[in-house]
Image (cartoon, helix red, strand yellow):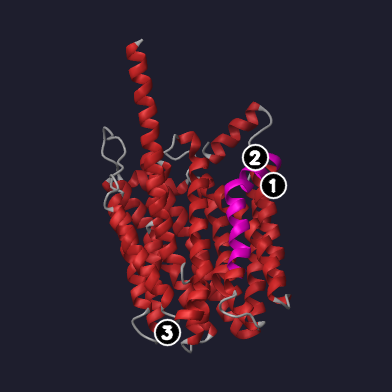
Amino acid sequence: MPKQKENGAQSVEGSKTRESSRFFFLVIVFMFWFSSYIYVPVLSPYVEHLGASYVMVGSVLGIYGLMQILFRLPIGIGSDYLNRRRPFIYLGLIASGASCLLFMAGAHPGWALAARAVSGIAASAWVVYSVIFAGYFPKEEAGKAMGMLQFTTVIAQLMSMMISGYMVEHWGWNAPFVIGGLVAIAALALALRLPEQQQEKRENAIQLKDLAAVIKEPLLVKVSLLSVLAHCVLFITMFGYTPNQALDIGASKESLGWLTLAFMLPHAVATLYGSRLFGRLLGDRGTLLLGFAGSALFTLLIPSMPTLAALCATQIGNGFMQGLIFPLLLGKSVSGVAPFKRATAMGFYQAVYAIGMSGGPFVAGWMSSAYGLSGGFWLGGIAAALAAVLSWVWITDAGGSRERTGKQGRIHGR
């Protein structure tokens, strides 16, 4: 009996330790995204304020994703190969702080381009953040872990973006960059206390060819391509040109906070609860179809909204619909992948969807130059509609007969 009590006490203590580790890590995650997104609502108006054309604005927005295309997969492979996570956490925080400093280095749009490139390197480290947090949970709770991580990300983005316009209105364009840099430094100080998370040693050293085989997983490829289109829409709309649309119809920079709230609050709710609720009702395929089709509709409505209130209404719908999509795709990206290969799988997934983060706003910049801002929003609507069709064709829910379930398990890596 005493031994059973001792084992029970150790189990409770271990559970408390895991919960404490999760909370500590989520604090760092919150600060990481706070520093990275505090200037996002005013970024495209700021670059335009520097005298840049829509094409240059699109380049500044797009280079963020381009850097992630280049760096995310190498970071994932490097982390798995070295069996180290913590150095890449440091890299992300240092780059996030450095990008804020570069924004303040000069008034030429070229400085903004360089700063946004460095912030893309910072975001590339998210590969390792995702893997570390998944490691705090049993494999069967990967969906729960990704939901908590995504929720923390969204709340950090919401809180930082809500105050961005207010700071610019009252303290000038550089205020968000100053606060972002200070938060990144504070997060780095906390991260120095973060314990290293290593996988159990294998009998044979991991080979690069083993990691390369991960990217051939069919489900990983499909959800990565769907995520390209999802991020294309997100970085054309809320993280791209929607603030410009608001200013064009007479909104003040301070009121951009309401636009951010209208998008991010339902986005956070859908991220934490919506995908699981709708997943039970509609299945994965139905949920993705609803999310992408709804996002297409609300994106196409943006240029026709005459007032800020009407524009906020489209953001409420778009925020919720996109919130259904991202946790679902994120969870599927690592399903069936061995723990020692997860950073590689996540690196591939995030590097591929960064194509949408880069290409979407860049092409939208060209279309906006030619057809006005409405041209970019039409591009986003078409991308979301295409993703809805592909979701219906590619994603098959588990269920039915045992034979069918087994077949789907092989297809989806479950």
Residue placed farthest to the bottom in the image? 51
Q: Say whether disc 3 or disc 2 marks the residue closer to the N-terminus.
A: 3
Tag 2 and tag 1, C-beta contact below 8 Å:
yes
Which is nearer the eye, 115 or 336? 115
- Label 1 neighbour load within 10 Å: few <14, some 14-19, many 20+: some
Locate the N terminus and report the quarter of the image it occupies. Answer: top left
Question: Magenta includes 273?
Answer: yes
Circle 3 sits on which residue? 109
Q: Is residue 2 above or below residue 217?
A: above
- Type of amino acid at the residue the image marks with label 3: Pro
Residue placed farthest to the top in the image? 1
Residue 127 seen anywhere in this rendered image of the structure? no
Circle 2 sits on which residue? 397
Q: Is residue 236 left or right of residue 46?
A: right
Secondary structure mostly seen in the magenta stretch:
helix
User: Where is residue 31 drawn, in percent x and y?
Assistant: 40, 58
Q: Say whether disc 1 or disc 3 marks the residue closer to the N-terminus.
A: 3
Label 1, secondary structure: give it.
Answer: helix
Residue in the image at 28% along x and 45% along y: 196
- Type of amino acid at the residue the image marks with label 1: Gly
